Amino acid sequence: MTSAAPIRGVTDAEIAAFHRDGAVLLTGVLAPEWVSLIADGLEECFAERDHMSSEVVAQGATVRADQLLAARSPSLRRFANESPVGGLVGSVVAGPVRFYMDQMFFRRAGPMAPTPWHQDTSYHNVEGTDLVRAWASPDPVPRRASLEVVRGSHRWNVTYRPMVGRDPDMSDEENALRMALARKRGVYEKGGAGFAYRSVVMDKSLPPTPDVPRDRDSFDIMGWDYEPGDVILFHGDLLHGTAEGVTLDRDRRAYAALFAGPEARYIKRVGQMVPDPPGLAEHEPQTGQTLDSFGDVFPLVWSPGDWN
C-alpha cells in the first residue's frame, strides 16, 4: 500500500522544526476528499459504540475516546493506509513508515473536557525515536482549544508515568473509594467492554508526569489555529494535552493515528494502557522485536521513493 501524494510536500524548514520542537503544523496538505473521509469515519464510529469505546466525563464535559478505529471503520482504514499522512510522517523520519494504531477524541460543542498532559509512548507497547502521531480534524479548531505541546520535551530522555490507571499499591477498597470520590467531583468514565482507562494498572516505576496546568508559565507551550486540511505531526515522547476552562463553539472531532519508522521496537510495558492492535497476540511478540516482524499487523504505508 502506498500513501497518496499530499497537496504539497513537507519543507526542509518544517522537518527541522519537527526535530527541534517535537511538533509541527503542516498547513494545507490534505485534499478535501481525505478530510471528508475523516469526518465520515468519525461519525460512523461515534454513532456505533463498540468494546473499545470509552466516555470520560470531567469538569461538566464529556469526551468520547475510541481505540483501534481502522479495525472497524472502512473510511478510517482507507485514510490510515492510503491518505498522504503516512508519507508526511515518512518525510520527517526519512524512512519507511508503518501504521501502528488510531484513536478518536470526539467532543460536542459546549464546555470542553480537557486532555490531561501526557506522552503517547507510555500508553503503548512500542518504543523508539521515530514514533510519530498524526493529528487531524474535519473541524476548524481555534488556538484556545488546540492540541498543545511542551516544546522540546521529546528530547528530555524520560518516559513518564501515565496519568490514569489503577494504583497497584492500593487495595480494592481503597481504589473503590478513590473512584467514588472522583465521581463526587464530577470525574468518571463509562468504559467499554474491552477498554477502560480506569481498569489498567499504573506503572509506578516511572516518574510522575509534570503538572503542566499548575506550573504552566514554567513551560514553553506551543499550539496552533487549525483548519481542515492541515495535519499536526508530533513525536511520541512529546508532552501534550489541552488547556482547561475552554468552551467550544462547535464540535471538535479529532482523529489521531500513530505511525512508526524503522527504529520502532515492541516493548511489553508493565502498565499497558491501550490494547495491542488486532492480530498481534498470535505472533507472541517479544520485547525488542521490530514491527516488521509481525506480518501485516503493522502495514507498511510509505517508503522513500514512493512519491517520485
Image: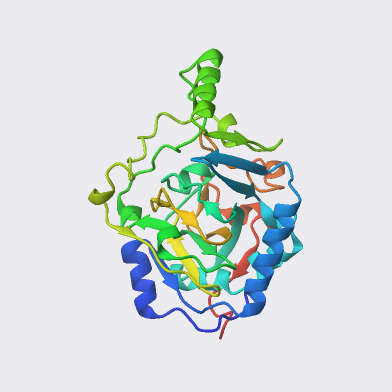
Quarter assignment of residue 207: top left
Name which residue lies at 32% across and 48% down. 157
Instruction: Tell me what residue is drawn at x 72 percent, y 42 percent.
Output: 282
Q: Is residue 181 left or right of residue 77?
A: left
**Residue 194, position in %: x, y?**
69, 37
Q: Position of residue 83 (x, y in %)?
A: 63, 72
From the viewer's side, name the closer residue of 245 and 199. Answer: 245
| Residue 240 located left or right of residue 52 | left
- The quadrant of the picture occupied by the C terminus is bottom right
> Can residue 2 be spotted in the picture?
no
Residue 221 lies left or right of residue 94; in this view the side is left
Q: Nearer the viewer, residue 231 or 78?
A: 231
Front residue of 50 and 142:
142
Q: Residue at x 56, y 80 (%)?
A: 6
Q: Nearer the viewer, residue 270 or 47?
A: 47
* Depicted 9 relative to depicted 85: above or below: below
Q: Residue at x 52, y 63 (%)?
A: 134
Determine whether 168 is above or below 294 in the image: above
